[in-house]
Amino acid sequence: MKPFNLEEALNGKTVITRDGRTVSQLHYFDISTFELYPIYGVIDGMRNVQTWAKDGTFDVKTGIERQVDLFMA
């Protein structure tokens, strides 16, 4: 796995989670309302939308690595 790269992800490169699941429908919202977690996407076609920080981390507040942190495939 390669470190998450927002620019590459937004240009269509494949994004996966730390545990290897595919992330689709990735969107970046560049507005202050979504400042802490501006990245939104769907993991493995699940019915819910997840959020991430600009660096692809799921849990910015604690800094703990999570299985849903983002990486490039």
Image (cartoon, rainbow, N blue to C red):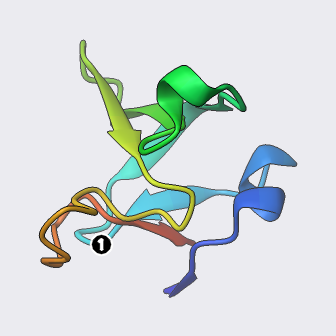
Q: Quadrant of residue 8?
A: bottom right
Camera-side residue of 3 and 22: 3
Residue nearer the viewer, 37 or 9: 37
Q: Which residue does the image show at 60% across and 28% down from the upper left? A: 32
Q: Where does residue 21 sit, x and y in percent of width and height? A: 32, 55
Query: Is 37 rendered above or below residue 45?
Result: below
Percent position (x, y) of residue 68? 25, 58
**Depth order, front residue of 69/45:** 69
Work out which quarter of the rendered image holds the C terminus and state it: bottom right
Residue lying furthest top in this view? 47
What's the amino acid at mark 1? Arg
Residue 28 place in picture, x, y as percent:
66, 34
Q: At 49% from the left edge and 86% from the top edge, which residue is drawn? A: 1
The residue depicted at 20 percent of the width and 76 percent of the height is 63
Residue at the spot 65% in from the left edge and 57% down from the top edge: 14
The residue identified by callout 1 is 18
User: On the picture, is 26 further left or further right than 53?
Assistant: right
Disc 1 secondary structure class: loop
Say left or right for 41 vs 10.
left
- Horizontal side of 1 relative to 58 (left or right) equals right
Residue farthest along the right direction in this orientation: 11
Residue 71 vs 45, above or below: the answer is: below
Q: Position of residue 29 (x, y in %)?
A: 66, 28
Badge 1: residue crowd in 10 Å (few <14, some 14–19, many ≥20): some
